[in-house]
Amino acid sequence: MAEILELRDISAGYDGDMVLKGINLTIADLDFIGVIGPNGGGKTTLVKLILGLIKPMHGSIVFHDPGERNLIGYLPQVSQTDKKFPITVLEVVLSGLMSVKQGFRAYTRSDRDKAMEILGLMGIKHLHRKSIGDLSGGQMQRVYLGRAIIANPKLLILDEPNTFVDNKFEHDLYALLGELNKTMAILMVSHDVGTITSYVKTIACVNRNLHYHRSNIITQSQLAAYNCPIQLITHGEVPHTVLGEHIHTHHHE
């Protein structure tokens, strides 16, 4: 598969305080990477680096197509402050096209039809004229996911997507991500290791360093070996799978 971007020996942080060190990661077409790690371990910093919101202290981020930085869809953590903006559901989804529109061209009928189609996919087409201030957290999450995918990105980045998702939509969300992964790569940050391992293809453990696990099957002992102090909690009966040879690269401080 063609590579989308590479992080090469990245170190990054804020005001001289290093948060990430020696990070190497390649993201290719149709990857589905789950990013896990403790709070403060650098997961959000990793996302900010890929989005270009911060610059690395050391190393480089290489996009194999220079225009691909504009082809990233991003679903941030939704906060209550988002509700203060006087904007409708349809307008929020349409705003996801701004990165691919030339200048300030008006939205076309085709753009609006596509936005309505996506809202239908999210199960909230009937809310298209509602202000986002009138929505629940779960409904807002669906709206922002619609905004993230309307431009058909090469890479979709999701930051804790299940934080505000209601139970009714959670299963639908992961099923939808599975469908989206047929046409785009996905990088999903989550604290719920037990849930995401059912859906992702590979796992990146981030705790100052990054250890890439080339499978979605991971054990508590492997997490400990990666210096990734996350408790692996499973629900119900989970089949046990024995992994073959496990290849990973350690970065020493």
Image (cartoon, helix red, strand yellow):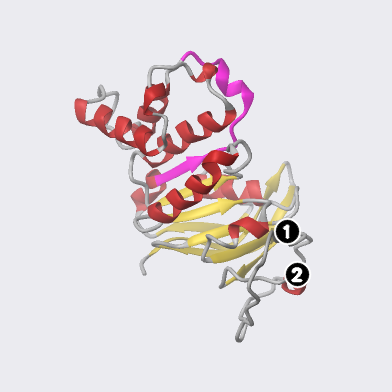
Query: Measured from the top left, where is residue 87 in percent x and y?
Result: 45, 17
Residue 250 is a magenta residue: no
User: How many other residues sit within 10 Å of disc 2, few (<14), some (14-19) or many (≥20)?
Assistant: some
- Say which of 15 and 41 sits in front: 41
- The residue nearer to you, when weighing 169 against 40, is 169
Give the structural element (helix, strand or loop) at label 2: helix
Q: Mark 1 or mark 2, which is nearer the start of the sequence? A: 1
Farthest-out residue, left? 109
Residue at the top extreme of this rendering: 86
Q: In percent of the image, x 58 and y 38: which residue is there? A: 165
Q: Amino acid at mark 2?
A: Gln
Quadrant containing the C terminus in the rendered view: bottom right
First to last magenta residue range: 72-86
Q: Which residue is mark 2?
A: 220
Q: Secondary structure at mark 1?
A: strand
| Quadrant in which residue 59 is drawn | bottom right
Q: From the top left corner, tell me how far across and down residue 216 is, in percent.
A: 58, 68
| Residue placed most toward the observer, 107 or 10 | 107
- Residue beneath label 1, please? 207
Q: CA distance from mark 2 to mark 1?
A: 15 Å
Up/down of 9 relative to 148, above or below: below
Picture coordinates of residue 29, whole percent (x, y): 39, 62
Can residue 192 be seen by looking at this rendering? yes
In the image, residue 87 above or below residue 93 = above
User: Residue drawn at (37%, 39%), measured in percent from left and top?
Assistant: 121
Q: Nearer the viewer, residue 14 or 158?
A: 158
